[in-house]
Amino acid sequence: MRQKIVAGNWKMNNDLNESVALINQIKEALVEREDVKAIIAPTFIALDKASQLLSGTNIGLSAQNMCSEDSGAFTGAISANMLKSVGCEYVILGHSERRTIFGETDKLINAKMKKAIASNLTPIFCIGETLEERESGEMKNVIEKQVREGLDGISESDLSGTIVAYEPVWAIGTGKVATPDQAQEVHAFIRNLLKEMYSEELAENTTIQYGGSVKPENAAELIGQKDIDGALVGGACLKADSFVAIIKNA
Ligand code: PGA
């Protein structure tokens, strides 16, 4: 059985005090479940404090990004070991905002994936097509390229445990959610690709989250699809009640 995982990507929201308040509200409202794991991804400045507040809970802690290098002259960057040192267990890599706004390429994302895995951080590896790519019939080619290049040179044993997040760019922060059928189709395609590239076992055991305008109202139907194993949530994770409701409905 694959584990269902609901992760909240806070993006560039909440200062330290606001982060502490939100974590405390989530802790209070969340009834922990064996079958659904919750993860939060606050900003870098809140990770240390978040890790202290989450100790003794089953809520996982993720960063939103990291550098592919270990240390040195990379102004403004944060390394995998720095994330580990504040208690981070996961890191979101390849988010579409990193790809489009910050110009991250598949090659760079691949280097980050390798560094995260080598540092014992579990990647949440994001992929997804734009509306233009979907409408021009390029969707599957785009997804396949992102998967093949993002995972290039990573062995099956190293990849095992990695979380994949399918996030159609046109559904992120737009309120336009993919229909359960649209999302299921791409999730099945990704799982099949993992089977082709690795093995049936790896494909069947890999958690593939859906992301893009997930809310309490649409979470159950989306996550109820055969190949959808949870959600990566943006806007709706900034309020404890809606984040907790998504986990409850998963
Ligand atoms: P959204 O963001 O839920 O606000 O659409 C999802 C994401 O970017 O991970």
Image: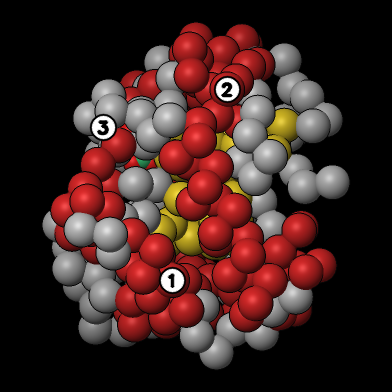
Sequence-first tag of 2 and 3: 3
Judged from the image, the secondary structure of the residue bearing numbered disc 3 is loop
Give the side of residue 95 with respect to residue 97, left or right: right
Q: Which residue is mark 3?
A: 173
| Disc ID at residue 221 | 2
Judged from the image, the secondary structure of the residue bearing numbered disc 2 is helix
How far apart, in angstroms, are the residues tagged by discs 1 and 3?
24 Å
Q: Position of residue 233 (x, y in %)?
A: 44, 33
* Figure check: 6 above or below 198: above
For the view shown, which residue lies furthest in the bottom direction? 153
Give the residue type that dot 3 points to. Answer: Gly
Q: Which residue is mark 1?
A: 144
Q: Position of residue 170 (x, y in %)?
A: 24, 42
* Figure check: 10 above or below 202: above
Q: Is mark 1 within 8 Å of ligand 1?
A: no
Q: Is mark 3 within 8 Å of ligand 1?
A: yes
How far apart, in angstroms, are the residues tagged by discs 1 and 2?
26 Å
Q: Position of residue 182 (x, y in %)?
A: 44, 40
Which of the 4 image quadrants contains residue 137? bottom left
* Figure check: 152 above or below 93: below
Give the residue type that dot 1 points to. Answer: Glu
